[in-house]
Image (cartoon, grey):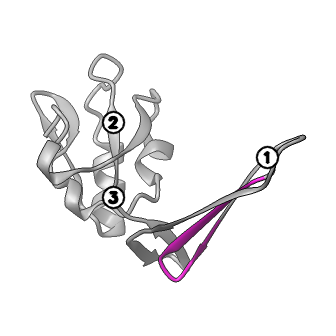
Amino acid sequence: MILVRLVNGTCDATSNQIGGENMSKRIEVETAEAFGRTFVKGNIPEIHPVRCMGCRHCINLCKKLGPNVLDIVDEVAKPVRPQNCIGDGACMLACPTKAIFLMSKYDPASAPAAV
């Protein structure tokens, strides 16, 4: 069992292994406060280009909520401003075809192919 707790930008992960020793790890993370909750920044949506029908539901919601990460490129939604993403996953919930399937760590030095 793994327990993860976020406190003041520090993520504490503790693993209780059966028959083994407890292991814990502390990771510094950048967080964003929005909608009365704390989110770990640095995650961006990955959008399946075949499933995405360009309906703009995810784009409109993201823009309305503030981050404004997504836009249509070549008739498919893509994260064109990944540095703005707060990682709340609202775009995933807005997608009627479930084309937004993962949130992955964003590294500016190695931007995903969608950007």
In the displayed image of the protein, which residue is found farthest to the top? 50
Residue 9 falls inside the magenta stretch: yes
Q: Secondary structure at mark 1?
A: loop
Categorize mark 1 by other alpha carbons within 10 Å: few (<14), some (14-19), many (20+): few
* 61 relative position to 97: left or right: left
* SS assignment for the magenta stretch, majority: strand
Q: Using a 10 Å C-alpha cutoff, classify the residue at mark 3 as few (fewer than 14 neighbours), some (14 to 19) or many (20 or more).
A: many
Q: Amino acid at mark 2?
A: Glu
Front label number (1 vs 3): 1
Distance of mark 2 from mark 3, alpha carbons? 13 Å
Instruction: Name which of mark 2 and mark 1 comes first in the sequence.
Output: 1
Q: Which residue is rendered at x = 40% and y = 74% of the image?
A: 32
Kind of residue sitting beneath label 3: Gly
Which of pointers 2 and 3 indicates the residue nearer the eye? Answer: 3
C-alpha span from label 1 to label 3? 25 Å
Q: Residues within 10 Å of mark 2 (few under 14, many from 20)?
A: some
Give the residues drawn in magenta, as a range: 5-15
Residue lying at the far bottom in this picture: please name it.
8
Q: SS class of the residue under badge 2?
A: strand
Give the mark toward the camera: 2 or 1: 1
Q: Where does the image place residue 27, in percent across and percent down from the top left?
A: 48, 65
Image-based side of 25 in relation to 35, left or right: right
Circle 2/circle 1 CB separation < 8 Å:
no
Marks 2 and 1 sit apart, C-alpha to C-alpha, by 27 Å
Q: Please give the name of the residue rendered at 30% of the width and 69% of the height, measured from the top-left corner.
A: 66
The image quarter containing residue 73 is top left
> Residue at label 1?
1
Residue on which the image places disc 2: 46
User: Mark 3 sits on what residue?
Assistant: 42
